[in-house]
Amino acid sequence: MLKSRERPSEEKKLPPLPNVNKWGRVVTRFAPNPDFVLHLGSARPAILSYEYARLYNGKFILRFEDTDPRTKRPLLDPDRGIDAYEMIREDLRWLGLRWSEEYIQSERLEIYYSYAKKLIELGGAYVCTCPAEKWREYRDRGMACPCRNRMIEENLELWDRLVNGQPVIPGKNRLDEGDAVLRVKTDLSHPDPSVRDWVAFRIVDPEKYPHPYLLYRYGRNKALRYWMWPTYNFACAIDDHLMGVTHILRAQEHSINTVKQMYIYKYMGWKYPEAIHFGRLKLEGTVLSKSRIREGIERGLFTGFDDPRLPTLAGLRRRGILPETIWRIILDVGIKPTDASISLENLFSINKKILDPQVDRYMFVPDPVKLVIEDVPSELEAVLKRHPTRTERGARVLKLRPENSELTLYISRSDLELMKVGLIVRLMELCNVTVLEVSRDIIRARYHSKDVSEVKKFEPPIIQWVHPAYSVEVSVIVPEGMNLKTVRGLAEDSVRQLEVGARIQFVRFGFVKLDERTPSELRFIYIHP
RNA sequence: GCCCCGGUCGUAUAGCCCGGUCAAGUAUGCGGGCCUUUCAAGCCCGUGACCCGGGUUCAAAUCCCGGCCGGGGCACCA
């Protein structure tokens, strides 16, 4: 049973699922292909399927669809520490999804074989040995190929040979890829040619393409045993039925697959689940395409699956986007069949609202320049609150002692522009100064007063600062579209205490996340303003 | 080319199934104000949309037809 989890209340309600009463308990599934990690686009079917199951007190299933070891090779290479199956589980757990059952299709081949046999016996499928090209000609003309009329017995015999990796082409002494496929008998005049007698199984030479999961999990013998691999439509059709799936939520690119899979259900006398197709998701400034992302990583454009520029869940997570934010976006977009392009503004705004109350504030000056304050009468104390309103979180207290009545601080170069001689400036939580002199690299100012109330009437700029004795050099990586900018500066030294992964706000700079701490450097990632 | 599916403020979404309550709601953005020791957050006010054309009807964002535009599919991928 799925438990409700802690999540910011979603102001939007999901529309009801169709025909819930007809089915009894709602069962949904998320069925990723482990040939790559999940991205924001995959979060849509995952979250919606999970959330509907939760809403109806139903069951949510995770199913890995890894039935093509040739062109959609599962991403699994324990020697290099890469395991997409586990990375996907991690992404889902991060999103807060829990599943009550998990299946891996490559482990279920025997099941698919038995249903293939059943389908052949019912006259619903036949072994086709036509060359692909030749067959397409028949198809385009809406004609039956010679194999279509094969007797059931002959089909069963051929199927047996195929499953055992034995040759089926007369005069050939071995089985090769492309020698045969198992086709589902559909309607040869169907307006969509791809529906006409679609392929249920094809040959994948296990010698050439041993399935990585079988190989690593069960060893070479098992991996070399299987020659016939079901296509998506076959495996999916069988599994959705066997697993009792009642509601399928998937992207609209799958809508024709519903039509194809329906044929199997008809032959078997099964009831087809409710299928809901939603549109595609786009994220402004990025590409939500597995192949394009993979290509970028391979070409070295990105540092890995979790590059903060990437819309992969790993990338978003590394960047500091919260799972709650992803939830809100997905729930907000809903199940409309239209495509939706999510704006970064929106994503950031949601994330910021969640982050703002829970995150501590720290001083940071990018691109520091010196500010020398003259005539400082005595030691100054700065109380830097962790949070402006949640004062119970405490503060850092800094005691700054002037030398020869002078106090040297650093402020951001971007604030240098607003320094005009004679201007009164408030150094946040510290004191007020009057600007005396501004040059390229240094500002001289005179101590004016301590309390902010003394200069309120001047409406002074209020800026952040750091003291050299209480500072640490940090860098902030700023993802900007396809670029990665690095901003260097000084932060107050208490950031040394932060743990990797901590999210904070650099005052007047933006929200950042501590990405890495080396003995020599603290490196943050810029989340958003 | 053929076959599906869509088009509501800049963006996202509600409403469309069951026509009137929609001179269209919400979020975000933008403008203004308040608050504030951050140019953040919060609060208040404002701005801004039914793709076009016909039809049905007393009445259409909602139903029908056509056009235009967008997306998807047309694999021995999922």
Image (cartoon, grey):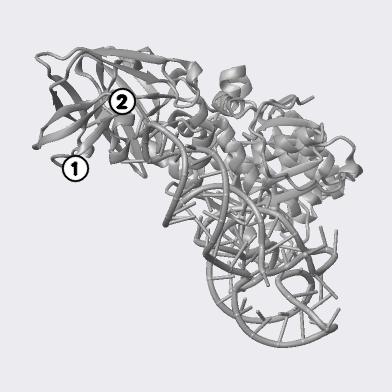
> Which residue occupies the foreground of this view, A49 or A486?
A486
| Residue that carries the numbered disc 2 in the rendered image | A451
Q: Is residue A39 left or right of residue A52?
A: left
> Which residue occupies the foreground of this view, A17 or B9?
B9
Instruction: Please state the total of marks drawn on the protein image.
Output: 2
Residue A229 visible? The answer is no
The C terminus of chain A appears in which quarter of the rendering?
top left
| Residue that carries the numbered disc 1 in the rendered image | A417
The N terminus of chain A appears in which quarter of the rendering?
top right
The type of residue carrying mark 1 is Glu
Comes first in the chain, label 1 or label 2: 1
* Quadrant in which residue A56 is drawn: top right
Residue A173 on image: x %, y %? 61, 37
Q: Residue at x 18, y 38 (%)?
A: A416
Residue A433 on image: x %, y %? 20, 30
* Quadrant in which residue A192 is drawn: bottom right
Labels 1 and 2 positioned on one and the same chain: yes
Secondary structure type for disc 2: loop
* Quadrant in which residue A452 is drawn: top left
> Which residue occupies the foreground of this view, A49 or A260?
A49
> Marks 1 and 2, Cα distance to the nearest angstrom?
24 Å
- Front disc: 1 or 2: 2
Q: With respect to residue A496, does A152 lie above or below?
A: below
Q: Is residue A335 left or right of residue A205?
A: right
Q: With respect to residue A404, does A298 lie above or below?
A: below
The type of residue carrying mark 2 is Asp
Residue A166 on image: x %, y %? 66, 34
